[in-house]
Image (spheres, helix red, strand yellow):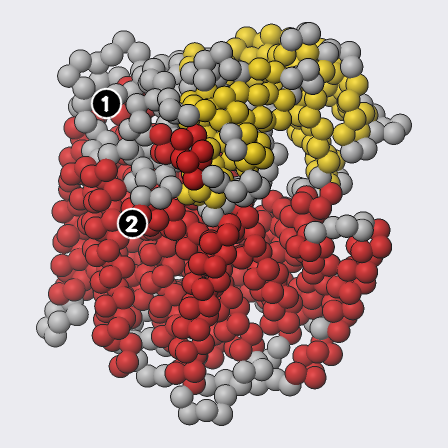
């Protein structure tokens, strides 16, 4: 019953999306103004129906209704409660339903909250949101129905992938999806503004909070995903340039560029065409990411779909939406008047460099990610593109970008003088050189990228707080704080990455209980190894006692877990976090002679990587608050405004 | 900018950046993409030693041997027609076993001898390296259809 209700709600939502697109576009015609009135409630109703459908699926998973095919395939009654719920989006159909649900909620949020856009542009925006939703509803209903029943319900389900049974991971996809799909709003704004030819500061100011919000979630999602891969996979790495990681990085790069160019448009009315283009590109990257991850052409923990028709379906949607938006851009952009000019040496100039570098990095990541697919389909040649390519191409550019980031915020809008800018960043520049000299002296033989990374991180950290210099901190606006915190986060994260790659110590041995192994500054005693039965798996747990100098001993207990349903082994790393780094331990297989494989890492300041990511997101959140406050006042002033008018 | 057509200049800059990205990307791909070889391909093509490549096939039954240090293994990768001896130091991923499919990243040290840096992990029992799909050499035992 619940499954059928969920499916019905999905059909109704799809019909409402079609109605929303029709009404929104109708409102653009002359004489269609009264249709405007209906657009907002329809968008809200569409979100309510989609949410109902999603709630139905969560309920089916929660109750483990095994007569539903999806539940039987991806869950079981023995799966713990949290993962029965998270299991809803731990599979292809469910995650696509979550995707559409967030899309519908984003559309409804625009309909309910957006007060800055001119009515016509808003109608076009909501219509665009409806058109996007319609395609993905079709995808769900025709090729990925999550509510399909089995003729006979099995006695027990297949279970849930043990690798995904982790509290952090349960909330990683929803966070990332809010970011991905939040960018659809920027896309729809761009399409709306192109349809009404209304590209200007008002449009940029209206779009900025949505971009900021999506970007904050993307940043959090990527940071959390990186930490998950780090501790859950047990390989000691924090970024693998896996296509699915790239799929989340690409929208982030585009959104970061958009975030900066939209500020130029809002503040100085410059970069009109470029900003609209970026808004289109950012969500296109989200869709490309969805296609890559969900089409099954990549094999990874994320690739659920193995049905080529689904891949083809998403590919067609992708071509329609991206192609359509680009065609609209090409047809309309010449009629959008050029914005304000600026001097090459100015805040705008620095932001243009930022945008160009981000675009080039995005291009490089895109090429590296798609090349293996293109090569295989064109020549049949099988190859993979991994860290050597990405580090060599994106790495140096990212460092240049970070260096520009140090100078940009201390430059004036419109026009500045190089000599003055140089004076303003003199202290950070000196700090960078001192740090470089220190690193060369104290740790000779470092590779170029970590070396430059360490030096730049010191300078950029100083430069990022420079905008606060001689300012009354209490009267500094939130969005300035946001920029400072986010840029500081980049420096912190860079320091962590450079330190991790420069100073990590690794030990790999087979040891008997009672033996002591050293890694970095730690002596690690292998105290015991015990079986440990638990819930839906059985584990073998090693007890390691690590001591550094005269410090208190740290007890670490890494495990090997064996799940029975589905049958699979996972290694659970044990990590001890200290202020200056992490001790990371993994236990492997037993080997002859009563020995066990132990892999130990000492990773100095590795935590800065994710602390920096969290700071970047915090900076975005502060900016969002800063940018939303004036609007809240405006709503209060116009409280007589009809809510659905 | 003093120039009349700043938009044109910016558009050209953007174009130059993208072309630059494409050129940089393609040239980096030429020497940094790692190609996939089956043992037969590798022996036929004489892969130059030291170049980063991927080797895929089956772990031959009865070929897995562990060195005295407890963390280094030697095994043979076969595709039925040819065989390559591989050596790996580290903790092997879950589900790495004899008679099962494997993809190893590393380099050839000599014809027929492979030093693996990484053994690609299978995420679950349904995983099949795309390179092996359709060769019918993957151990089945999947719960799903």
Q: Do callouts 2 and 1 mark residues in contact (Cβ within 8 Å)?
A: no
| Residue A537 on image: x %, y % | 49, 13
Viewed as shown, does residue A455 lie left or right of B131?
right
- Residue A378 is marked as 2
The residue at the far right in this view is A550
**Residue that mark 1 sits on:** A69
| Coordinates of residue A500 in the picture (x, y in percent) | 68, 43
- Can you give x and y, in whole percent of width and height, for residue B141 in the image? 34, 15
Chain of the residue under label 1:
A
Quadrant in the picture for residue B132: top left
Residues at marks 2 and 1 on the same chain: yes
Residue at disc 1, secondary structure: helix
- Where residue A368 is drawn, which disc sits there? none
Chain letter of the residue carrying label 2: A
Q: Is residue B84 visible?
A: yes
- Classed neighbour count for the residue bearing mark 1: other residues with Cα under 10 Å, few (<14), some (14–19), many (≥20): many
Q: Earlier in the sequence, mark 2 or mark 1?
A: 1
Foreground disc of the pair 2, 1: 2
Viewer-proximal residue among A405 and A153: A405
Q: Nearer the viewer, residue A144 or B114?
A: B114
Identified at 35% across, 56% down, the residue is: A283
Name above or below for residue B1 compared with residue A157: below
Of residues A315 and A28, the one drawn nearer to the viewer in this rendering: A315
Going by the image, does A542 lie left or right of A209?
right
Question: Dot 2: few (<14), some (14–19), or many (≥20) neighbours within 10 Å?
Answer: few
Q: Residue at x 56, y 34 (%)?
A: B110
Look at the picture and state if A143 lies above or below A121.
Answer: above
The x, y position of residue A439, in whole percent, is: 79, 54
- Where, by quadrant of the figure, is residue A173 drawn? top left
Q: Quadrant of the N terminus of chain A?
A: top left
Identify the residue at horizontal 37%, vertical 24% (top origin). B81
């Amino acid at each position: 019953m619940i499954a059928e209700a969920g499916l019905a709600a999905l059909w109704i939502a799809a019909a409402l999306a079609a109605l929303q697109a029709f009404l929104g576009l109708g409102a653009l015609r002359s004489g269609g103004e009264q249709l405007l009135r209906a657009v907002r409630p329809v968008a809200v109703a569409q979100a309510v129906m989609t949410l109902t459908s999603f709630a139905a699926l969560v309920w089916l998973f929660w109750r483990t209704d095994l007569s539903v095919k999806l539940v039987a395939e991806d869950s079981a009654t023995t799966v713990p409660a949290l993962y029965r719920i998270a299991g809803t989006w731990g599979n292809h159909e469910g995650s696509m339903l979550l995707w559409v649900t967030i899309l519908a909620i984003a559309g409804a949020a625009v309909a309910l909250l957006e007060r800055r856009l001119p009515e016509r542009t808003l109608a076009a925006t909501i219509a665009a949101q409806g058109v996007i939703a319609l395609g993905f509803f079709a995808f769900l209903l025709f090729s990925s129905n999550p509510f399909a029943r089995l003729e006979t319900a099995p006695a027990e389900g297949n279970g849930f992938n043990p690798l995904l049974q982790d509290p952090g991971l349960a909330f990683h996809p929803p966070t990332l999806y809010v970011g991905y799909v939040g960018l659809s709003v920027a896309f729809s704004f761009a399409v709306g503004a192109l349809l009404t030819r209304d590209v200007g500061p008002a449009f940029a100011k209206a779009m900025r909070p949505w971009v900021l919000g999506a970007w904050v979630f993307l940043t959090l999602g990527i940071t959390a995903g990186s930490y998950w891969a780090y501790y859950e996979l047990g390989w000691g790495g924090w970024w693998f340039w896996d296509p699915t990681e790239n799929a989340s990085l690409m929208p982030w790069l585009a959104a970061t560029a958009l975030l900066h160019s939209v500020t130029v448009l809002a503040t100085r009315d410059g970069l009109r065409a470029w900003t609209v283009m970026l808004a289109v590109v950012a969500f296109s990257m989200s869709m490309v990411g969805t296609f890559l991850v969900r089409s099954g052409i990549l094999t990874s923990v994320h690739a659920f779909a193995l049905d080529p028709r689904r891949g083809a379906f998403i590919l067609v949607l992708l071509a329609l939406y991206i192609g359509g938006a680009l065609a609209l851009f090409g047809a309309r952009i010449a009629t959008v008047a050029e914005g304000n000019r600026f001097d090459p040496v100015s805040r705008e100039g620095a932001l243009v460099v930022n945008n160009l570098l981000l675009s080039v990095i995005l291009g490089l990541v895109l090429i590296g990610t798609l090349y293996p697919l293109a090569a295989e389909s064109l020549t049949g040649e099988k190859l993979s593109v991994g860290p050597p390519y990405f580090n060599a191409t994106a790495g140096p550019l990212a460092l240049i970008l970070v260096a520009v980031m140090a100078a940009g915020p201390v430059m004036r809008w419109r026009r500045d003088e190089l000599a003055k800018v140089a004076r303003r960043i003199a202290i950070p520049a000196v700090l960078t050189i001192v740090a470089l000299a220190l690193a060369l002296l104290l740790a000779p033989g470092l590779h170029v990228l970590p070396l430059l990374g360490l030096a730049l991180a010191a300078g950029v950290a100083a430069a990022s707080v420079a905008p606060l210099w001689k300012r009354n901190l209490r009267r500094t606006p939130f969005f300035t704080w946001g920029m400072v915190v986010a840029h500081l986060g980049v420096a912190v994260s860079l320091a962590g990455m450079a330190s991790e790659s420069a100073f990590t110590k690794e030990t790999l041995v087979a040891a008997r209980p009672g033996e002591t192994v050293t890694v970095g500054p730690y002596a690690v005693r292998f105290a015991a190894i015990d079986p440990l039965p638990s819930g839906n798996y059985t584990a073998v747990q090693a007890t390691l006692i690590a001591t550094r100098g005269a410090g208190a001993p740290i007890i670490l207990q890494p495990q090997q877990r064996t799940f029975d349903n589905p049958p699979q082994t996972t290694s659970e790393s044990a990590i001890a976090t200290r202020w200056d780094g992490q001790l990371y331990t993994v236990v492997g297989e037993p080997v002859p002679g009563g020995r066990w494989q132990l892999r130990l890492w000492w990773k100095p300041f590795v935590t800065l990587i994710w602390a920096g990511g969290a700071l970047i997101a915090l900076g975005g959140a502060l900016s969002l608050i800063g940018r939303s406050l004036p609007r809240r006042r405006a709503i209060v002033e116009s409280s007589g405004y009809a809510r659905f008018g | 900018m003093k120039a009349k057509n700043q938009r044109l200049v910016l558009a050209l800059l953007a174009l130059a950046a993208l072309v630059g990205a494409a050129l940089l990307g393609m040239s980096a791909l030429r020497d940094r993409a790692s190609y996939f070889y089956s043992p037969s391909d590798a022996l036929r093509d004489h892969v130059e030693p030291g170049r980063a490549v991927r080797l895929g096939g089956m772990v031959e039954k009865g070929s897995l041997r562990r060195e005295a240090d407890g963390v280094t293994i030697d095994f043979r990768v076969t595709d039925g027609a040819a065989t390559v001896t591989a050596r790996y130091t580290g903790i092997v991923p879950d589900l790495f076993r004899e008679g099962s499919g494997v993809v190893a990243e590393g380099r050839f040290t000599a014809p027929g001898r492979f030093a693996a840096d990484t053994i690609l992990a299978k995420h679950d029992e349904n995983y099949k390296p795309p390179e092996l799909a359709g060769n019918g050499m993957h151990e089945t035992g999947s719960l799903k259809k």
